[in-house]
Amino acid sequence: MKLRSSYLGIILLLPALAVMLAFVVFPTIWGVVMSMTNASLVGIGAAHPRFIGLNNYISLLRDSRFYHSLSVTVIFTVFSALIGQVALGLALALLMRRKDIKGKSVIATAVFISWVIPEVVAGYMWGSYASREGLLNLIIKALRLDRLGIEPTNWLFYKPLETITIANVWRGTAFSMILFSAALESIPNFLYEASSLDGASSWDRFRYITLPLLAPAILTDLILITIWTFSVFTMPFIMTGGGPGTRSELWTIYIYRQALLPPYEIGYAAAAATLMFLFTLVLIVAYITVLKRGWG
Amino acid sequence: MRKVKDKPLIYLFMALLALFFLAPFTWLILSSVDPKADIRFRIPSSITLNHYAKVLTGRTFTWIVNSSIISLASATLATLLSVLASYSLTRYKFKGREALVDFFVILRLMPVMVVVLPIMIIFARIGILDTLFSVILLETALELPFSVMIGSSYFETIPTDFEEAAMIDGCNRFLAFLRVTLPLSLPGLVTIWLLAFVTAWGDFLVPLFLLRTPDKFPVSVGIYMVFGEHGTVNYGLLSALSIIYSIPVLVVFLLMRKYLTKGIAGLAIR
Amino acid sequence: MIMKSKSYLIGLLLSLLFIASSLCLGYLYAHPQKRVLRICYGEPWKIPTEDAIKEFKAKFPDVEVKAEMIPYGVDIVAKESADFAAGVAADVVLVDSFMIPEYAEAGYLAPLDKLVAAWPDWKYYSLPMRRIVSYKGHVYGIMFDTDVRMIWYRKDVFKEAGLPVPWQPKTWDDILKAALTIKKKVKGIFPIYIPAGTKWGEATTMQGFYMLLLGADKPPRNRLYDYKTGKWIGKSPALLRAFKFYYDIYVKYKLAPTEFNFVPDVWGTWRRTFGPDRLIGMALGGSWEWGEAWGPKGIAPVPDRDKVVGFAKMPGWSGGAHGEPKWVTVSGGWAWTIYSKSKVKDLAWEFLKIVNERDRVAKYAAAFGKVAPRLDAAKVPEYAKNSYLMAILEYLKFTDFRDAMPGYSKVSYFIQETTEKIVLEGMTPEKALDYFYSKMVKTFGKDKVEVIPLGS
């Protein structure tokens, strides 16, 4: 396509750029500035914030609750996204390829709806589902899962982190499923035909054809869902609010609680948010690099 | 080939999948028609549609109106701005164009939590905190990167030849855009608008930070607030509200499922 | 025919309208200096307020009353605070008594000392009911709607455990012993429940913690704020004793349901589990539960409520033997106040006298099953025939209030957090006290936080 060079191009860009600069970029920088003050939502810190240098970062690095939220986030991300969504997404994508199986579209639609329904609604219904007298426990009883060591309980209280992790698998698997389905479509059929003539087992075909050819898609998927899962807030927040206590306190919920609950330390929360921003930025840059270099 | 032996196993797997993905919805649907709905799971002994009728009155209706205002306004704004921007990105060349595209990717993937905290303070300073307007502004800004990306990919599919032909026929650039490119990219615009609409419609974090007064809440924050309220939670009403609230999102996404699938596929095969 | 009568009717209406409007205009012209009284209140108090306005209008026909009702769904405290701050508040405002110190400090409220001194009805307000509406020695309002707190207990569970019914513990030990007996004798019951943790919010502090703290030492050492020095109390024997009670029932003896403090719907769960589900032996809770939760039209009705639900006064830790109050309860609620910038304070006071009349207050309280703030409500038949309301009227004589000084919401949150640490992590009372103290010092500064030596 031929491109023109003209100032008009920049002028057309300006409105959108201005909005993004004013409401996304500037606040992010402002957040870094705030993180070096004792700004607070109420009281003295609200009216006259003072510059305190890196003090917030120093106390953040000494705050055991901060590290706790970090490890909760890592566990949540590794198990719900990297293991749960990728494995289940891949299994679903493979399933969707089977032409001899009926009822696939029902499953695909259910997975899709779980992904697009408003997060608040998802959190709300899981709040009942996983409660002591919720349907989950009835299913556990009906399937006699106690024989596998799974006892009915108040999941949100006794296993909060496990519960929000599984709920996030439920929530996010659709993306991996769709991505892998598309990648599988692109694998030429003759490769499989050739291999079955060679007498390869179905596992062999998966191991030596499907998996290697899927590797780029898996890498894209891993980076993207890591970024997204890392910033998940709403559904776990509605389900457990980070609790009981701090047992399921993700990084995002930690920031929310530091900022909007007493003692309302906005500057401190901004420091935590800045660290989060830097971490995510590294991942995003990695993603862009991978995207540009291609797979090859 | 072999595919006979593993069939029962696959159907068992599918049954478990169906259970895993569908079971959480059961209570939501049952409690919305149960006159004695409770947080506990129960099969209703009788069925009522009263909850649905009640959603359309009082404060739950106010919340639906607020959600509509926020989503309509921000989707329209985002569409307008992104059309200009993506037209520029696909039709003009200037320094830093490549960097700009990367910049949009970064903005799109950045956690909202990072932005929303300082913006709350900024909005409080300039006195627009706790207004629908402030939510509309931020939602627009957050939708823009994605909207521009969709817009660009659409304009790229429309050859400049048509436009140039029109210009030879005596149209100026603006008219050429208006008469030729815009109609051709209409499906793209609708896509941008719809996706921006459902993004704002479902959002929770931004209004949670920017709004304080209950009669300004959108549905998402309203549901959260009622869920933890002083022991008088009417779960039937809340479930009915949740379902009504989900309908626009479901309709849009199910309509656009093919399009979304194609978009994600674009990420996979490159 | 029909057409004719219709146009006739319209003509009549029009001429009536004309006459009425000209009368109005003439009236306005003749009374150019008509005085206006603005009254602001929330929708929950619609009935008694409208009733009072009617009476006021009859008494002062030449005053125009502008009623501003804040509808359900709007945060009343936020709206009124904004009105005060913007200088546009009504002359008469029904405020949350909890906000009185802050409003008074900001100069929004007119002191009523002289007015109430000359008001014969003032003597029917118990000392605690007067202190809730006071700040730094001045009276700023009149309590209109209030509540008290008590120990709720299940008579059926107590009987099964072989405990006496009716039951009235004299010390904290009596409570603990009864709970231990229930644990031993009745299966499947959590013997005692006291709200704890951040999920309950302010209820943890008010329904649970204050009920313990106020009875944990002699006044004024039994508070969160020292009114003499103007400092918050960060460490005291009373705080330690209160934290220890949480520790004993939740951790040491495992008598209380930790889980119930962390469900999505803490209020609904507590009302259901104590009421229809019969899972709790006794609990600290508010007086409103009798009707609002377990009454026939309540949220979680209890069949045979009068037979199975009992209530008792909360005792001081040693029953008053160490100088602490013998009985403890704590109140909040709504009070009528006058805006300091009002130009019609005389009319505002006239309205306050009318709206707070004995019969109106008592009838409103009786209709909604609430305790009346006036002791003479007992003389009103509608109130007197409700034996429950009559029984809790006595609580007004010894009730107390929260230390709602500026900064209170932070202190309250630290209390909630500390109790959460105890019940969830099994933090010992001593460590809990240190935790609370460190939070207080970090927030208010060491010079603003007082320590009462633990040995004293």
Image: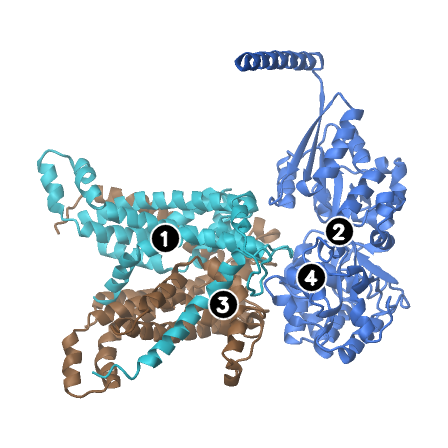
**Quadrant of the frame with the C terminus of chain B:** bottom left
Asked if residue C163 is positioned above or below residue B63 in the image, the reply reads: below
| Residue B72 on image: x %, y % | 39, 44
Chain that appears cyan: B
Which residue is identified by label 1?
B251
Foreground tag (2 vs 1): 1
Q: Which label number is shown at residue C365?
A: none
Q: Residues within 10 Å of mark 4 (few under 14, many from 20)?
A: many
Check the residue under mark 4 and report the chain it is in. C
Q: Is there a contact, CB below 8 Å, between mark 2 and mark 1? A: no
Labels 3 & 1 near each other (Cβ < 8 A): no
- In the picture, measured across the screen, residue A263 lies left or right of residue B240, that is right
For this rendering, which residue is in front, B56 or A294?
A: B56
| Mark seen at residue C271 | 4
Which of the two discs, 3 and 1, sits closer to the camera? 1
Label 2 or label 4, whichever comes before in sequence order: 4
Separation of marks 3 and 4 at Cα, in angstroms: 31 Å
Q: Colour of chain C?
A: blue
Secondary structure category for the residue under label 4:
helix
> Which amino acid is tagged 1?
Val
